[in-house]
Image (cartoon, rainbow, N blue to C red):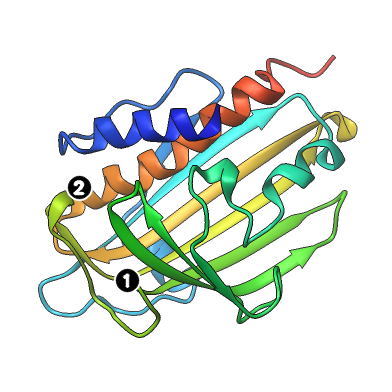
Amino acid sequence: MLSSLFLTSLLALSSISVSAAPSSPVEVVQERGLLTTLLGGSTCPKGYTSGSVTNKAAFPVSMSKIKPTVDSFFDAAWEGFTTASTTGKDNVPGAVRSFSFGGILPLTEQLTSYVDASPVLIDRVWKGVGGEKAGTLPVVASMFQANLSSWTEHFTITPSCFGKAITLTWTATYCSTNDPVAESLFGQAHTGPIAGLEQVFGTFTKCT
C-alpha cells in the first residue's frame, strides 16, 4: 500500500512539475533559506540554491499506535523504499542507510539526532552524505534535472487531542541546481508516504 502510493508520486515527479498537495490532512508549505541554518545546514555553494519544504499531517491515533510504523531509521518501508545497506545501530546518531530512491537514484543518509520522548515527542534529524555511498556529494540526479550538494530532513511527531491524535511534521532543506524540481522531489517524497499513512490510520477531522 505505502510503496504503491510512493511510486505513484514518483510518476508525477518524473514529469518535472510541482504537483498540488493531496487533500486534507496533508499541508505543504515552502520556505526558502531560513530553515537551512536552523537545521544545521550551510550556505549553498556557487551554482546551488537553498530551499525547504515542510509537510504536516494529523492522524486520529495515539503516538504508541503509529510509532512502530515510522520510528525506525533503517526500516523505511513506510517511506516507500527498502534500505540496501546500513552501518551503525538503528536510531543511534551516526547510523547510515543507503537506498535507491524510486529504484533509479542511489542515496546515502546519516542520522544526526534522535530523541524518543514518547508519548510527548519523537524527533529525528538526518542528512544526505552521498549517492551510492557516503562521501560522494554532490548527487548528480540527471533523471530529475537537479543536482543536490546537501540536504537535511527533520521529522517530528507530537500528540494532540489529549493524546488521542498526533501531528506529524516533516521538513527537508536542501541546496540544489534546480529549485522547482528539488521542491517537487522532496515534496513528493513526503506526501506519498503521508498519504499512505492516511489510508492506514485514517483522516483526522477534529477532537471529539
Tag 1: amino acid: Gly
- Position of 12 relative to 75 (above/below): above
Measuring 61% from the left and 30% from the top, which residue is drawn there?
197
Q: Position of residue 113 (x, y in %)?
A: 64, 73
Q: Position of residue 151 (x, y in %)?
A: 37, 67
Residue 2: % across, % down: 54, 32
> Which x, y percent locates residue 106?
33, 63
The quarter of the rendered structure image containing the C terminus is: top right
Given residues 205 and 200, the one toward you in this image is: 200
Label 1 – label 2 distance at C-alpha: 18 Å
Farthest-out residue, front: 84
Q: Which mark is residue 131?
A: 1
The quarter of the picture where residue 158 lies is top right
Rendered view: 162 above or below 73: above
Q: Is residue 42 above or below residue 10?
A: below
Q: Residues within 10 Å of mark 1 (few under 14, many from 20)?
A: many
Q: Which residue is mark 2?
A: 181
Q: Amino acid at mark 2?
A: Val
* Residue at position x 64%, y 62% in the image: 124
Q: Nearer the viewer, residue 197 or 107?
A: 107
SS for dot 1: loop
Residue 41 appears left or right of 59: left
Element at label 2: helix
